[in-house]
Image (cartoon, grey):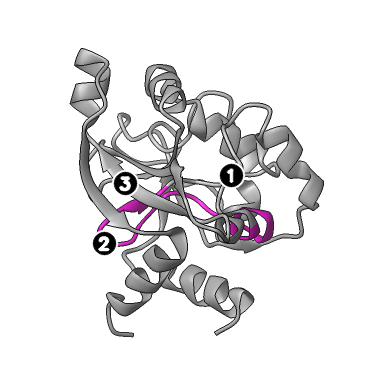
Amino acid sequence: MTDAELIEAFVGEFTKREALKLFRQFSLPDGVAPGDVVPLLTEPWHEDADKDVDGWATWRPRRVQTPHDALETLYKVVPGPLPPLYERLILTYQWAEVDLGKYRLSSNFPPPLEGLIKVQKADSVMFRALSSHRLVQFGKGPGADYDPVCFDLKKRSADGDCAVIRADHEEILNRERLVVVEVLAGSFRELIRQTLTAAPPN
């Protein structure tokens, strides 16, 4: 399977999960406006009867063609470089957070890479602590788990890929200490393959 085919299969898994919903109040970090994510929506925002929900809409991944030099903007803020396969993913697709079983993949909102940077920096304490350890968060634990899922830039292979770890969020936020809970995969490529293998039936 080529890298392009691998990414296509991976993104295809997004729509095989539960209904893909965005909530205006809970899904959009500071700086990402409801209007910014309209290109991802499959319908207009719904107003929910529960005022605490503050509107929702369904979404789908969107194929884009983001120039490679857009990565320069990302790397002015985020440690890098990130695994080449992940770079290709964020340059060719935009999406909202999606639960893929063992982890949730963080959003890559429009506009190109600016939305991703805003998601990266949404928790400033977490971002600062992880960056100091050469970790780049690109997801969280499954369900409501707040543990960051990260690329460990200190564990890089010859092809530029990185180990994927899950860190204890309470140790970071309460004690400013890094505790690795789990190594999810030896590389992002391996994580994608694991995701495809564990995918629910159609």
Q: Position of residue 171 (x, y in %)?
A: 19, 23
3D distance between C-alphas at marks 2 and 3: 15 Å
Which tag, 2 or 3, sits closer to the chain's start? 2
Q: Position of residue 112 (x, y in %)?
A: 70, 44
Q: Is residue 104 left or right of residue 142?
A: right
3D distance between C-alphas at marks 1 and 3: 23 Å
Q: What range of the chain is rendered magenta? A: 88-105
Q: Are marks 2 and 3 in contact (CB under 8 Å)?
A: no
Disc 3 crowd, CA 10 A, few/some/many (<14, 14-19, 20+): many
Where residue 180 sits, quadrant-wise, is top left
In the image, residue 101 lies in the stretch drawn in magenta: yes
Which tag, 1 or 3, sits closer to the chain's start? 1
Which tag, 2 or 1, sits closer to the chain's start? 2
Q: Which residue type carries mark 3? A: Ile
Question: 95 or 195, which is in the foreground?
Answer: 195
- Tag nearer the camera, 2 or 1: 2
Question: 200 or 158, which is in the foreground?
Answer: 158
In the image, residue 148 lies in the stretch drawn in magenta: no
Mark drawn on residue 165: 3
3D distance between C-alphas at marks 2 and 1: 21 Å
Q: Which residue type carries mark 2? A: Gly
Q: Residue at label 1?
A: 109
Quarter the N terminus occupies? bottom right
Give the structural element (helix, strand or loop) at label 3.
Answer: strand
Residue in the picture at 33% in, 61% down: 100
Q: Position of residue 156 (x, y in %)?
A: 48, 50
Where residue 35 sits, quadrant-wise, is top right
